[in-house]
Structure formats: C-alpha cells, structure tokens
Amino acid sequence: MNDKVLVSVVMPNEKDLEVMNESLVTLRSLGISCEVTVISAHRAPHQMIEYIKNAKERGIEVIIATAKGAAHLPGMIAAFTTLPVIAVPLKSPLLDGLDSILSMLQMPDGVPVATVSVNGARNAAILAAQILGLHHDNISVELERLKMRLSSEVEEQAANIKSKSFTQ
C-alpha cells in the first residue's frame, strides 16, 4: 500500500461511516491510502474550508464526500478546491436519497461534482482509483486486477446458472 494519503473521505456525521466504510475497504484493497473525517458544511463551515484548502498541500488528490437530504457538503467542498470531488448521495428517510442525488447533480457551472449512485460508496472508491490510475501505475495495475476478478465472477455465475438447467 502506498503510504502517502491520496484520498480523503469526508462525511457530515460519523453514522455515515456505515455506508462509507465500503469506500475505505475498496480503496485499501487497491493499495490506496486514505483518510476519513467528519466535516460539516452547515455546523462548522470554517473548519470545512480550512480542511479543504489544505488538502492539496497534504498530498490529497481526490476527495470523496457524502451527505443526505440537502446534501451540500460535496458541492461546498468543490467550491473551495480544484481537486476532483466525488459525491456519494446517501439514502435519506424522506425521499430514499432522491433529494440527496438531485442536490449533488445540480451544481452550477464551474463547480463540478462527480456523483455516483445512492449509497454507492464502492463505486466512488473505484472512480477515485481510476482518476489516480492515470498517473499512478501501481493503482492502474490493481484496477486491471479488479476488473478481471469482476469478469471472472460473472463467468462463474453464468456457469452456475447453466448447470442448473434453467433454460428450456
């Protein structure tokens, strides 16, 4: 694993780690060091700004941010950095995450946020790895291995179905 922390995973509440742990597990399985912290765009905006403004100096290359409901955190982070920001909308009790995904997708010109599926923490990590893989060969190699494993799993599942004679 690369000891240099390349990805920052941020969330507005420590309870969000239940979903976001999948990002951490995936990043680490690809040999990518990451950090995780709680930041709030609403309850502690000055701390958020300070954290984000120093991210690039600390060596961070990609930020994965999550939120639910109004889901401002990824967009606010993107407003204060030129680093790529990947948003993970969280399933919310009121609208099942639709509110989160819409607020993350509807960013103004000049403040892009890449957005994955609701609770898509694993895909956020894979997208971060794909970005990093453009200039980190070791990460690119790990992504190739991951894609090969995914392909093998599909082939194995197809063989299992075929062996059960579900076709007429």
Image: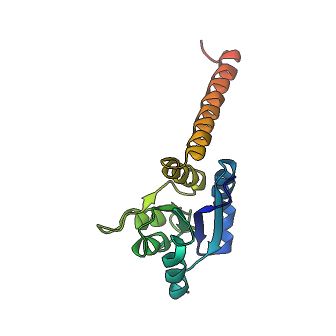
Give the residue drawn at x 57%, y 71%: 58
* Colour pattern: rainbow
In the rendered image, the residue lying farthest to the top is 168
Quarter of the image containing the C terminus?
A: top right
Give the residue drawn at x 52%, y 64%: 63
Query: Toward which corner of the image does residue 108 lie, by quadrant?
Result: bottom left
Give the residue drawn at x 62%, y 38%: 146
Viewer-side residue, 89 vs 22: 22
- Residue 157 visible in this rendered orientation of the protein: yes
Q: How many marks?
A: 0
Residue 87 horizontal side relative to residue 1, left or right:
left
Give the residue drawn at x 52%, y 83%: 50
Viewer-side residue, 83 vs 153: 83
Q: Position of residue 20 (x, y in %)?
A: 64, 61
Query: Toward which corner of the image does residue 35 lie, by quadrant?
Result: bottom right
Instruction: Give the answer, above or below, for where 118 lies relative to 65.
Output: above
Instruction: Give the answer, above or below, for where 145 lies relative to 120.
Output: above
Viewer-side residue, 140 vs 163: 140
Q: Where is residue 130 in the image (x, y as percent from the top left)?
A: 51, 48
Q: Where is residue 138 in the image (x, y as percent from the top left)?
A: 60, 45
Instruction: Give the answer, above or below, for where 65 lies relative to 46.
Output: above
Instruction: Give the answer, above or below, for where 121 lies relative to 58.
Output: above
- Residue 41 visible in this rendered orientation of the protein: no
Q: Position of residue 140 (x, y in %)?
A: 55, 43
Viewer-side residue, 45 vs 131: 131
